[in-house]
Image: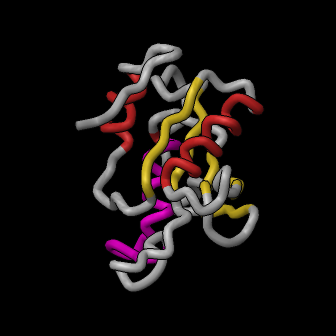
Amino acid sequence: MAPRPVRDLPGEGLLGAVLAGGVGRRFGGPKEGVTVAGIPMLHRALMALAGAGAGPLRVVGGPGNTGAWDENSGALTFRRIPDRPPGRGPLGGLRAALLEAESQGRIGVLLTGCDLPLLTADVLVRVAASFSEGELVVAA
């Protein structure tokens, strides 16, 4: 499940971000560490973003500052950034990702939640391929 190499993928130029700040009240706790088929949901989201060519990778919200994960030599490194402003839910996470993208000189953000374990790089490739600077693209 290592991410495919980044070559001419639509996500290039986009910051890859995963929303992972929720406390999961209805779920019974944070979702990012819950495993599906032996892989934490956060890492599945990061692999999908990397597979679509997005980078650098950021995790918005949650504990800790940096991290790395290696699955079959497919090392993924990411940095955590706080919601901006804190306490605003997903909108604070989206704003933080957009500000981070701007500070990194990226043209936009390829954003997903950490709780989509069946999300694939192929879906994100299609979303990224539909992106045009200054527009919003959403997978239905």
Q: Residue at (75%, 64%) from the top-left corner?
A: 65
Whether residue 121 is situated above or below residue 72 in the rendered picture: above
Q: Residue at (34%, 58%) from the top-left corner?
A: 116
Whether residue 9 is situated above or below residue 97 in the rendered picture: above
Left or right: 89, with 138 as reference point: right
Is residue 37 visible to the viewer in this orientation of the structure? yes
Dividing the picture into quarters, in which one does residue 139 lie? top left
Q: Residue at (74%, 62%) from the top-left corner?
A: 66
Residue 63, image x, y percentages: 67, 72
Q: Which residues are magenta?
A: 33-50
Residue 113, image x, y percentages: 43, 54
Residue 89 in the magenta stretch? The answer is: no
Left or right: 71, with 123 as reference point: right
Left or right: 83, with 42 as reference point: right
Left or right: 2, with 86 as reference point: left
Residue 104, image x, y percentages: 75, 31
Q: How many marks?
A: 0
Q: Residue at (66%, 40%) from the top-left corner?
A: 56
Q: Which quadrant is the C terminus positioned in?
A: top left
Q: Which quadrant is the N terminus positioned in?
A: bottom left
> 90 and 34: which one is in front?
90
Whether residue 110 is situated above or below residue 86 in the rendered picture: above
Dividing the picture into quarters, in which one does residue 118 lie? bottom left
Dividing the picture into quarters, in which one does residue 59 lie? bottom right
